Amino acid sequence: MRPQDIREMSDEEIKAKIEELYRELFNLRFQKAIGQAKNTARFKEVRRDIARLKTILRERELGIYPSKEG
């Protein structure tokens, strides 16, 4: 997920995406625990996407990069 794409999303969409990624991360951890994880590189991708989303939300809170909503 590119930062440019994230910045085009609303705050509500970003929060929903974070929740979705946390669920995916939980499922990946569960699959790993029972030995069914196929794409282990996805762990890193999901964690980084969560970090990107949270960073952009924080930028908006601080007014560094305001949302297009206003």
Image (tube, helix red, strand yellow):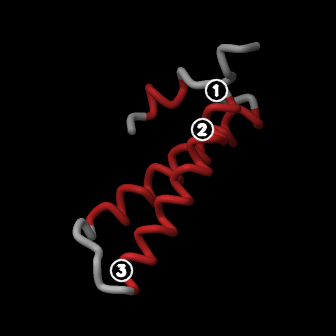
Query: Could you say whether the residue bearing mark 1 is in a helix, strand or loop?
Result: loop
Of tags 3 and 2, the one toward the viewer is 3
Question: Label 3 vs label 2: CA separation?
Answer: 29 Å
Q: Which residue is nearer to you in this view: 31 or 22?
A: 31
Residue 58 image position (x, y, % from top left):
69, 42
Relative placement, left or right, of 35 versus 20 is: left
Q: For marks 3 and 1, give the one nearer the viewer.
A: 3
Residue shown at 43% from the left, 55% from the top: 48
- 31 with respect to 8 (left or right): left
Kind of residue at disc 1:
Tyr
User: Mark 2: few, some, or many residues within 10 Å (few <14, many ≥20)?
Assistant: many
Q: Is label 1 or label 2 in front?
A: 2
Residue that label 3 marks: 32
Asked whether the residues under the numbered discs 3 and 2 touch, taking CB atoms below 8 Å apart as contact, a structural biologist would say no
- The residue lying at 51 percent from left, 53 percent from top is 21
Q: Is residue 42 above or below residue 33?
A: above
Q: Position of residue 59 (x, y in %)?
A: 66, 37
Q: Quadrant of the N terminus?
A: top left
Q: Which mark is residue 65?
A: 1
Q: Quadrant of residue 11?
A: top right
Q: Which residue is mark 2?
A: 56
Whole-angstrom CA distance, mark 3 to mark 1, is 37 Å
> Which residue sits furthest left?
38
